[in-house]
Image (spheres, rainbow, N blue to C red):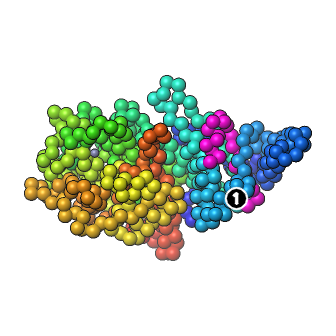
Amino acid sequence: MNEGVTPHVRSVSRQASFRYALRGVGQLVLTQTNARIHAFAAAGVIMAAWWLRVSTVEWGVLFLAIGLVLCAEGLNTAIEFVVDLASPQWHALARDAKDVAAGAVLLASLAAAATLRAAHVKKVLLFTGFVNTAPGGIRAAALAFAEATYAYTTTLSKGKPRSLKHLVVAQPGAAAIETELAQASGVLSGIELAKEWANRPANHATPSMLADAAQKLDKLKHMRVDVLGPKEVAELGMGAFMAVAQGSHEPLRFIVIRYNGGSKHQAPVALVGKGITFDTGGISIKPAPEMDEMKFDMGGAASVLGAMQAIGELQPPVNVVAVIPSCENMPDGRAIKPGDVVTSMSGQTIEILNTDAEGRLILCDALTYVAKLKPSVVIDVATLTGACVIALGHVRTGLFSASAQLAEQLMSAGDSAQDPCWRMPLDDEYGEGLKSNFADMANVAGRPGGAVSAAKFLQKFVGELNWAHLDIAGTAWKSGAGKGSTGRPVGLLVQFVLDEAARLSASAKSGGKAPKAASAAK
Ligand SMILES: [Zn+2]
């Protein structure tokens, strides 16, 4: 899979190890060790450790010393912790779940990584035994180690950054996992960028700050970032977006990120992320409990930003355009009121019955904007409805699409990235409640099927586009003691784009000399 992806090898050390440095916040470096000697060395350590438990201490210490010396030789460094995927306990995990072997590796790695967090370990050697892991297994493991050792520090006076700095993978046939590690490295970088921005409190992540973060992607190859302000957005006629923003003193931002990795004539994949940096509900104000979690209402924007970071690092041969409408939703003397009617960029008028259903208002104008770029596919990502949390909980993202093929592609990308989604219905009857006596449509249709009627609202702005909507209200962040962003669905989005790049190059190969047919992406 993903033949189109060029491994992003930043430097090759003299030990024929490949090193992938991450530009993300965490600076976790994934290293792959090719030489069989490392695996033997690791085995030595494991044998020694085992011996310590079953035989005399003297023998154990001797073996341990030999193992450590071998490892230190092989890897030019001291190994502080060895994770043994060959141990019976983990093998049992993998055996029980043969068809989801990558998931088993992920579970095992999470278990190991949880102990690492307390241990302040700087380097981990992931030893897979003398067998190759299932496809996706190493990527899943790398992401699991990163997940378990992630540390948010930005607004802590004595924040402790993650102690784990290196993850070294030792397995025979290491060349086979080179692409996997490169992908893990890129995805990880994207996930951690998404987490950073989603976790920041709203006063440390205003629309302007989010736009500044997006501007930093500009230095990645094939990447161009444009940021529009209130004046430009008014000129474009984005009446629905402006209506939401008008209650806040923070100026809105409309962020456009273009990645041109494909040919000039190739229609882009478009990603649209909801960027409400704080959602009070507006005049239809939310209740106080857990309102702080509404800083996560830009989870869609954060994940799109993260996906673009990953794409910029992985450089797949495909064109991608990301659009992020960003503003606050505040109650104010100037704020939009229930019953107000606004004109969207599409020309359709909207009666705003509930000012807390603001995500769809900023997204509808972004979708109209994106349609003008003639994309091959449009995926919008939004923490859109509480109803989706009730429907699917915190496990799967809600997926809505009129296209069975696109839905299938997104489901499969989610499964292989361990970032799953689930297809929801889009029958026209669900849109009945959006009728209004005073505008072309209302912005809400009552509580029953609320996630679906929100999707039906968005569908009124996509015309014939090959479109999907991802409702991440249940999956973008966790509440309670472990409160924080999950970085989802960066993994799913990046996998979809990589798959799309592979599909494009496959169809270009089979289609002869004309790789620029935009319809090939459909
Ligand atoms: Zn809201």
Please tell me whether residue 118 belongs to the stretch shown in magenta: yes
Ligand 1 located in image quadrant:
top left
According to the picture, the residue beneath numbered tag 1 turns out to be 91
Looking at the image, which residue is at 47% across and 38% down?
481
> Number of callouts in the render?
1
Please tell me whether residue 66 belongs to the stretch shown in magenta: no
- Identify the amino acid type marked 1: His
Vertical order, 316 against 429 (above or below) = above
Question: For this rendering, which residue is in front, 18 or 493?
Answer: 493
Assign a secondary structure to mark 1.
helix
Looking at the image, which residue is at 53% across and 28% down?
159
Looking at the image, which residue is at 43% across and 60% down?
421
**Which residues make up the magenta segment?**
111-131
Looking at the image, which residue is at 44% across and 57% down?
396
What is the quadrant of residue 374 in the picture?
bottom left
Residue 144 percent location from the top left of the image: 58, 49
* Horizontal side, residue 437 vs residue 89: left or right: left
* Horizontal side, residue 99 vs residue 46: left or right: left
Residue 229 percent location from the top left of the image: 28, 39
Vertical order, 220 against 271 (above or below) = above
